[in-house]
C-alpha cells in the first residue's frame, strides 16, 4: 500500500511559511517617519515636536479606567432611574 505524501508535505511547507510570516510581526523597534516625510509640527505653545512613540501614546482622557465592577454571579440590579417606559 502506497501512501500519498505530497499533501502531507505541502501542509508542512504551508505551516512553515505561516510561522515565518508571523515571526516578522513581532518586530519591535523605534518608529521613524517614511522617507520624504517628517513628523507633524509642534503644537502651539510647545517648542519641540514630540517623537513618534510619544505621538502614539493615548492621553488618559482617551482611555479612562473602568470603574464598573463586573458581576461574577447572579445578583439583583439596583433601580435605574433612566430606565423609562417607552413613550406612547
Image: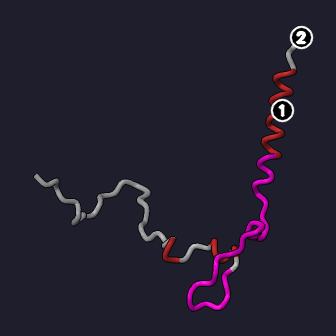
Element type at mark 1 = helix
Q: Is residue 81 above or below residue 5?
A: below
**What predominant SS class does the magenta segment belong to?**
loop
Span shown in magenta: 21-50
Q: Characterize the local packing of mark 1: few (<14), some (14-19) or many (20 or more) Cα atoms within 10 angstroms.
A: few
- The reply, left or right, for residue 87 in relation to residue 39 is left
Residue drawn at (83%, 28%) of the image: 10
Give the farthest residue toward the top.
1
Give the farthest residue toward the right.
2
- Write down the quadrant of residue 34 in the picture: bottom right
How far across and down, in percent of the image, does residue 64 sit? 48, 73
How far across and down, in percent of the image, does residue 6 sit? 86, 21
Judging by the rendered image, the residue that carries numbered circle 1 is 12
> What colouring does the structure picture have?
secondary structure
Residue drawn at (41%, 67%) of the image: 68
In the picture, which quadrant includes the N terminus?
Answer: top right
The disc placed on residue 60 is none
* Along the line of sight, the residue nearer the viewer: 3 or 53: 53
Amino acid at each position: 500500500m502506497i501512501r500519498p505524501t505530497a499533501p502531507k508535505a505541502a501542509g508542512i511547507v504551508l505551516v512553515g511559511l505561516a510561522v515565518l510570516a508571523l515571526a516578522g510581526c513581532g518586530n519591535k523597534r523605534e518608529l521613524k517617519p517614511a522617507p520624504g516625510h517628517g513628523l507633524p509640527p509642534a503644537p502651539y505653545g510647545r517648542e519641540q515636536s514630540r517623537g513618534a512613540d510619544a505621538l502614539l501614546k493615548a492621553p488618559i482622557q482617551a482611555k479612562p479606567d473602568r470603574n464598573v465592577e463586573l458581576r461574577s454571579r447572579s445578583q439583583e440590579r439596583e433601580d435605574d432611574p433612566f430606565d423609562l417606559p417607552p413613550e406612547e
